């Protein structure tokens, strides 16, 4: 599929609530699963032992780690989206991540990208769909407030939880 170019923040804002891009299919091979198991130390038989998985698992074969499928999002995004004006893009975090069905070795996955609304910094940053972690010390300021040079629209501004699919575009941050 052709790559989708989002030239600036205004264009990204116009796309809020719409599906702006769908990635090509990416095969999740047993070799990729094996490499992920080695990198993470998660060597459960359901991921690595094809014979045992075929005989004992309810899935009929080996399955990819849930976090492997999640970790492929940057690859799928890079192959699908172009943000030429962005100095950098950042994985800010995820809320409400679920793995509703297994990905068996040899199956393909794809991503659908939809910007979600959120508050913006006054100066340079915008993070449509980004969300902050709720597990932080009560005395420390939220990470998004510390890192955005323009502050927020209110000192007690709160961000609602958002789904995992999001884009983060940040310009002008040193």
Image: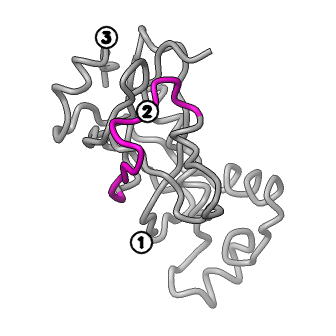
Say above or below: 36 vs 143: below
Residues packed near mark 2 inside 10 Å, few (<14), some (14 to 19) or many (20 plus) = some
* In the image: residue 40, left or right of residue 9: right
Distance between the alpha carbons at the discs numbered 2 and 1: 27 Å
Which of discs 3 and 1 lies nearer the camera? The answer is: 3
Q: Which residues are magenta?
A: 147-161
- Predominant SS of the magenta segment: loop
Distance between the alpha carbons at the discs numbered 3 and 1: 35 Å
* Residue 136 coordinates in the image, percent (x, y): 62, 61
* Residue 132 coordinates in the image, percent (x, y): 49, 52
Q: Which residue corresponds to mark 3?
A: 7
Mark 2 or mark 1, earlier in chain: 1
Q: Are marks 3 and 1 in contact (CB under 8 Å)?
A: no
Say above or below: 123 vs 130: above
> Residue drawn 40% across and 19% down?
123
Taking the view exactly as shown, the residue that stands out farthest to the bottom is: 56
91 vs 117, nearest the viewer: 117
Taking the view exactly as shown, the residue that stands out farthest to the front is: 155
Q: Which residue corresponds to mark 1?
A: 101
> Residue drawn 48% across and 54% down?
94
Q: Is residue 158 magenta?
A: yes
Q: Which residue corresponds to mark 2?
A: 168
Q: Quadrant of residue 38?
A: bottom right
Residues packed near mark 1 inside 10 Å, few (<14), some (14 to 19) or many (20 plus) = few
* In the image: residue 27, left or right of residue 65: left
As helix, strand or loop, the secondary structure at mark 3 comes to: loop
Mark 2 or mark 3, earlier in chain: 3
Snapshot colouring: one colour
114 vs 119, nearest the viewer: 119
* Residue 170 coordinates in the image, percent (x, y): 47, 23
Q: Quadrant of residue 96?
A: bottom left
Instruction: Say which quadrant the C terminus sits in.
Output: top right
């Amino acid at each position: 599929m052709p790559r989708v170019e989002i030239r600036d923040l205004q264009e990204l804002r116009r796309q809020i609530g719409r599906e702006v891009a769908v990635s090509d299919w990416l095969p999740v091979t047993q070799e990729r699963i094996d490499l992920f198991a080695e990198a993470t130390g998660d060597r459960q038989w359901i991921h690595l032992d094809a014979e045992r998985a075929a005989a004992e698992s309810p899935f009929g074969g080996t399955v990819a780690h849930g976090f492997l499928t999640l970790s492929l999002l940057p690859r799928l995004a890079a192959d699908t989206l172009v943000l030429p004006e962005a100095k950098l893009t950042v994985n800010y975090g995820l809320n409400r991540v679920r793995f509703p069905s297994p990905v068996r070795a040899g199956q393909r996955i794809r991503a659908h990208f939809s910007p979600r609304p959120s508050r913006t910094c006054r100066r340079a940053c915008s993070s449509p769909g980004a969300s902050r972690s709720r597990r932080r010390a009560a005395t420390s300021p939220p990470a998004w407030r510390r890192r955005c040079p323009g502050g927020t629209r209110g000192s007690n501004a709160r961000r609602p939880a958002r789904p995992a699919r999001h884009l983060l575009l940040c310009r002008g941050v040193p």
